[in-house]
């Protein structure tokens, strides 16, 4: 899994029928110091994440392991909304401090 920050949404009116009703998010990957990487990715959302929230992104075949997503052509899936991230007793992110 990868930590990422939701930067926006992606709207697609024409898509594979298996993706109908799926919400897509534009996520920016985060490094081990809590800094944004220059990489962005589109991920399906199964947890109701919002813009600026930090999330857990499952990638590759693991993104299709969640019930209901097995037969969808997905490479990335937001599987969790992060509350806090700490590294070596140093807080990198706290959802509570963002609001």
Image (tube, rainbow, N blue to C red):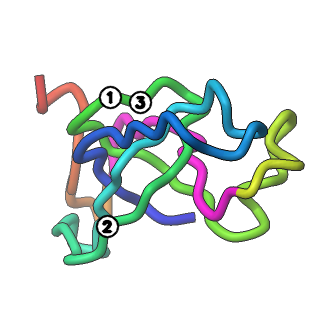
| Residue underneath mark 3 | 49
Query: How many neighbours does mark 3 have within 10 angstroms: few (below 14), some (14-19), or many (20 or more)?
Result: some
Q: Residue at x 52, y 55 (%)?
A: 57
Front residue of this view, candidates 49 and 12: 12
Q: Secondary structure at mark 2?
A: strand
Q: Which mark is residue 40?
A: 2
| Residue underneath mark 1 | 50
Region rendered in magenta: 74-85
Q: Are marks 3 and 2 in contact (CB under 8 Å)?
A: no
Residue 83 is one of the magenta-drawn residues: yes
Q: Report how far apart the C-alphas of labels 3 and 2 lie in the structure.
A: 16 Å
The picture places residue 98, in percent across and down from the top left corner, at 12, 31
The picture places residue 60, in percent across and down from the top left corner, at 69, 70
Residue 64 is one of the magenta-drawn residues: no
Describe residue 28's horizontal placement relative to residue 35 as left or right.
right
Ranked by sequence position, the earlier of labels 2 and 1 is 2
């Amino acid at each position: 899994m990868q930590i990422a920050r939701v930067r926006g949404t992606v709207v697609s009116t024409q898509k594979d029928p298996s993706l109908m009703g799926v919400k897509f998010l534009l996520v920016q990957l985060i490094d081990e110091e809590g800094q944004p990487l220059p990489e962005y990715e589109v991920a399906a959302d199964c947890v109701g994440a919002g813009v600026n929230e930090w999330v857990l992104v499952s990638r590759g075949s693991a993104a299709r392991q969640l019930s209901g997503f097995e037969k969808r052509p997905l490479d990335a899936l937001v599987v969790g909304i992060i509350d806090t991230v700490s590294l070596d007793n140093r807080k990198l992110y706290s959802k509570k401090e963002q609001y």
